[in-house]
Image (tube, rainbow, N blue to C red):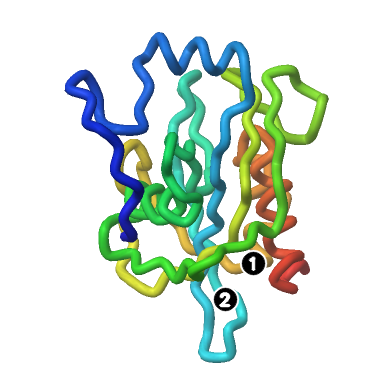
Amino acid sequence: MTDTADLPPDPERPAGWLSPEGIAAARRSLPLLYVDAVPVRVDEAGDVVAVGLLLRVTPEGVMSRALVSGRVMYHERVRDALLRHIEKDLGPVALPQVPPTPQPFTVAEYFPTPGVTPYHDPRQHAVSLAYVVPVTGDCRPQQDALDLAWLTPEEVCSEQVQVEMNGGQGLLLRQAMAHVGRMP
């Protein structure tokens, strides 16, 4: 992982992290920046042959499929946030192939109010930069992920998988497959 800029240490919390009260206040008053990553396996020609989806339990107790996703911390480069979240969700030897200057395939704007956009997050207004990221290493579910399934591009675009995804991530996944030329 690349280094982030050095900030003076805060004995109360790691650099870039808000207190629980601070993040709650921020979520109530301004959009937060996120990254969404679609982990993929590619063949020797560079074509996407498999897509990794996490299995998680929502706060409501519902099982759902999910992309790698998370906040960009204060003073953290987007590239570093991508690498950090991929490592957090897929493990330290996932070996993501993030280019030096990553370009998102789309920008997703999540609103706490359903229906404003296709993307919904009841906690906050968030703007997410979305990337397709090839991974070449050994990927294993980490943190709160229960499982990691590798599915074909056709399978992830199927209605069966789409209904297992929350907050509009199914649409984001279909956009990713269209971006890499793998829409069925």
- The quarter of the picture where the N terminus appears is bottom left
Residue 132's image quarter?
bottom right
Q: Is residue 136 left or right of residue 40?
A: left
Position of 14 with respect to 53 (left or right) is left
Q: Which secondary structure lies at badge 2?
A: strand
Give how far across and how far down residue 4 sits, in percent.
34, 50
Looking at the image, residue 72 sits to the left or right of residue 128; the answer is left
Looking at the image, the residue that sits furthest to the left is: 11
In the rendered image, which residue does mark 2 sit on? 49
Spot occupied by residue 20 in the image (x, y as percentages of width and height): 37, 14
Q: Residues within 10 Å of mark 2 (few under 14, many from 20)?
A: some
Residue positioned 53% across, 44% down in the render: 66
Q: Are marks 2 and 1 in contact (CB under 8 Å)?
A: yes
Residue in the image at 48% along x and 12% along y:
24
> Which residue is situated farthest in the bottom direction here?
44
Residue at figure coordinates x 55%, y 57% from the top left? 38
Question: Which amino acid type is marked by label 2?
Answer: Val
Say above or below: 125 vs 119: above
* Residue matched to label 1: 153
